[in-house]
Image (cartoon, rainbow, N blue to C red):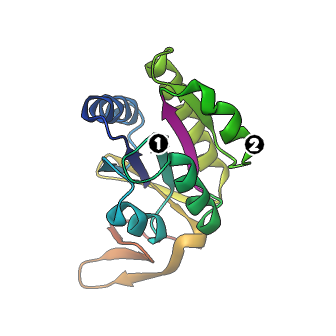
Amino acid sequence: MVNFIICDDNRKDREKVEKIVDKFMMKNQLHYEKHLFDDYDDTFLKLVKKKIAFKVYILDIEAPSMSGIDVARIIRNRDVNSVLIFLTGHNELAETVIRNDFLFLSFINKFDNCEERLINALGECLKILGVRKNLRFKDNGILYTIAFDDILYITRDSVDRKCIIKTDYSEFRVKYTFLI
């Protein structure tokens, strides 16, 4: 599962990013969720702290309550494995982002070929996801990817005749038997 965490204070820009993510992910048949925010508020920060599957942050630098640069610092203090993509109209802040060593994937200007560059960055995200050691399987036409590090245990439900994969963030019930 891929979790896209999108924050942009401009509703039109946020909806545009959401549509690009949907369009891109529909081609890949991967299970994904989107978490949309218009500010870096308490709900956003709770999601940063929450342990969920592979996180891809698409961050606007300028938001009402906090800078995307400060948020990236908070994210990196808790999580070095998530992917950061900065999407902003402030090209002059690129050097500041680079100097902070956020280990980010891309810095995209909203006014310079934004859609194509975001699609390319999303493709790189999926490559990064593929590098981690994962359990991958397809169930009902959806391709699931669960990092081995996230799996707490795997068991079998003999009544429903399903395999149960338990993680910190979810429980997956699938019709397959896994031999590990």
Lower position in the chain sequence, tag 2 or tag 1? 1
Give above or below for 167 relative to 114. Answer: below
For badge 2, the amino acid type reads Arg
The quarter in which the C terminus is drawn is: bottom right
Q: Which residues are magenta?
A: 82-88
Q: Amino acid at mark 1?
A: Ile
Residue that mark 1 sits on? 58
State the quadrant of the N terminus: bottom left
29 over 23 or under it: above or below? below
For label 2, the residue is: 99
Asked which secondary structure carries label 2, the reply is: helix
Q: Is residue 177 above or below residue 69?
A: below
The 10 Å Cα crowd at callout 2, few under 14, some 14 to 19, many 20 or more, is: few
- Residue 29's disc is none
State the residue in front, 20 or 107.
Answer: 107
Label 2 to label 1: alpha-carbon separation: 19 Å
